[in-house]
Image (cartoon, helix red, strand yellow):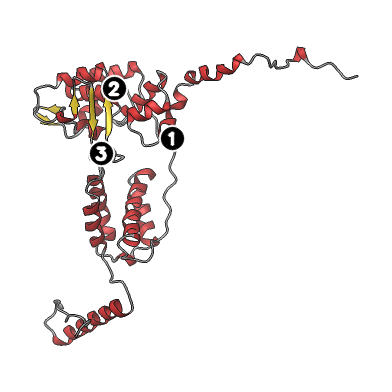
């Protein structure tokens, strides 16, 4: 008959007729609830993960998401989405915080929240997302090197890492974009490189003007590989934070410094050179000017000129102790 449900065709997982009948009855009841009462079918966490990865495969952080989801699997694998509550998420939160920083832990929690929100708002698999708080994070880290410190480090690094470090400081590119830079995205004649939106963190294409130091580094790589700019022993560089990197830091006497801090060094040097916020934002590919304002404090002299513009209004004299108003008596 029209509108009639199709017969159930699904393995019950048992050869016992009585158990099979019970499974059949449960499935039939669930179908009736879905069709007549509008009850949503229960969805597993794994189903949400598969769909999330398919829909977000264009993200620059796709591989990082997969790594996070592998770590989360012992907690969430085998769970239905409606079983993921604040108690379970808090357990994940405090277990992860034991082995990583609050900021890193927040990235895991944010991934869970994003998947659950999409399952609720877009896929309509669940009716609500459990509320939970992230850790409060300290202000963004700003660690940079002086020109003298960077020169010490450069001289201690293996040649391929030294070239990449110089290029990073000259362009402000993140390590993934330096490692993955391809010749097809470099124009030496126009002194220009670019990062396509699919490979950039904020998802938008990023234009990279190349100064003379950056150009010198790139020209040095010509002929080493048909597609990639930076290589080691004829193969594309896979990792920057190697034992060689940390050994060079130790020999150079530099502590508490990560590869990503080369990007902070780039921004700090630009600020000290007087590069304004809107230009630095475009050079570094930051999505908002707020991110760039973290570096304002490193160059207070750059603001001194702006403050001094009001010196022209000399008609207003500030009273000093010797220039007090005469008494009204």
Q: Is residue 241 visible?
A: no
Give the SS element for disc 1. Answer: helix
Horizontal arrangement in the rendering, residue 327 relative to residue 267 (left or right): right
146 vs 198: above or below = above
Closer-to-camera residue (192/20): 192
Which of the two discs, 3 and 1, labels the residue nearer the N terminus?
3
**Extreme residue toward the bottom, this view:** 18
- Say which residue label 1 marks: 290
Which of the two discs, 2 and 3, labels the residue nearer the N terminus?
2
Mark-to-mark CA distance, 2 and 3: 21 Å
Q: Is residue 172 visible?
A: yes
Which of the two discs, 1 and 2, labels the residue nearer the N terminus?
2
Q: Nearer the viewer, mark 3 or mark 1?
A: 3
Give the SS element for disc 3. Answer: helix
28 vs 274: above or below = below
On the image, the x and y values in percent for residue 179 come to: 20, 32
Image quarter hosting the C terminus: top right
- Say which residue label 3 marks: 197
Q: Which mark is residue 170?
A: 2
Q: How packed is label 3: few (under 14 Cα within 10 Å), some, or many (20 or more)? A: some
**Quarter of the image holding residue 104?**
top left
On the image, the x and y values in percent for residue 170 come to: 29, 22
């Amino acid at each position: 008959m029209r509108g009639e449900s199709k017969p159930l065709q699904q393995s019950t997982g048992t050869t016992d007729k009585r158990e099979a009948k019970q499974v059949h009855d449960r499935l039939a009841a669930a179908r009736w609830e879905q069709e007549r009462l509008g009850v949503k079918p229960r969805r597993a966490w794994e189903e949400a993960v598969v769909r999330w990865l398919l829909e977000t495969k264009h993200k620059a952080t796709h591989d990082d998401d997969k790594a996070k989801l592998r770590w989360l699997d012992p907690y969430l694998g085998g769970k239905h989405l409606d079983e993921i509550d604040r108690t379970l998420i808090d357990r994940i939160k405090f277990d992860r915080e034991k082995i990583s920083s609050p900021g890193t832990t927040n990235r895991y929690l944010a991934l869970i929240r994003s998947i659950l929100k999409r399952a609720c708002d877009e896929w309509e698999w669940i009716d609500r997302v459990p509320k939970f708080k992230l850790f409060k994070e300290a202000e963004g880290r700003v660690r940079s090197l002086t020109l003298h410190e960077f020169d010490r480090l450069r001289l201690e690094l293996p040649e391929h890492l030294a070239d990449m470090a110089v290029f990073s400081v000259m362009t402000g590119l993140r390590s993934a974009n330096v490692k993955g830079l391809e010749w097809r995205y470099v124009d030496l004649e126009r002194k220009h490189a670019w990062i396509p939106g699919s490979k950039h963190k904020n998802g938008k294409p990023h234009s990279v003007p190349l100064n003379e130091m950056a150009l010198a580094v790139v020209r040095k790589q010509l002929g080493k590989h048909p597609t990639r700019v930076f290589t080691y022993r004829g193969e594309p560089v896979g990792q920057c934070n190697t034992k060689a990197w940390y050994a060079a830091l130790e020999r150079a006497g530099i502590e508490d410094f990560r590869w990503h801090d080369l990007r902070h060094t780039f921004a700090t040097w630009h600020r000290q050179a007087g590069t304004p916020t809107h230009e630095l934002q475009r050079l570094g590919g930051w999505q908002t000017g707020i991110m760039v304002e973290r570096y304002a404090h490193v160059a207070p002299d750059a603001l001194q000129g702006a403050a001094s513009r009001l010196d022209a209004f000399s008609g207003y004299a500030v009273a000093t102790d010797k220039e007090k108003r005469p008494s009204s008596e």
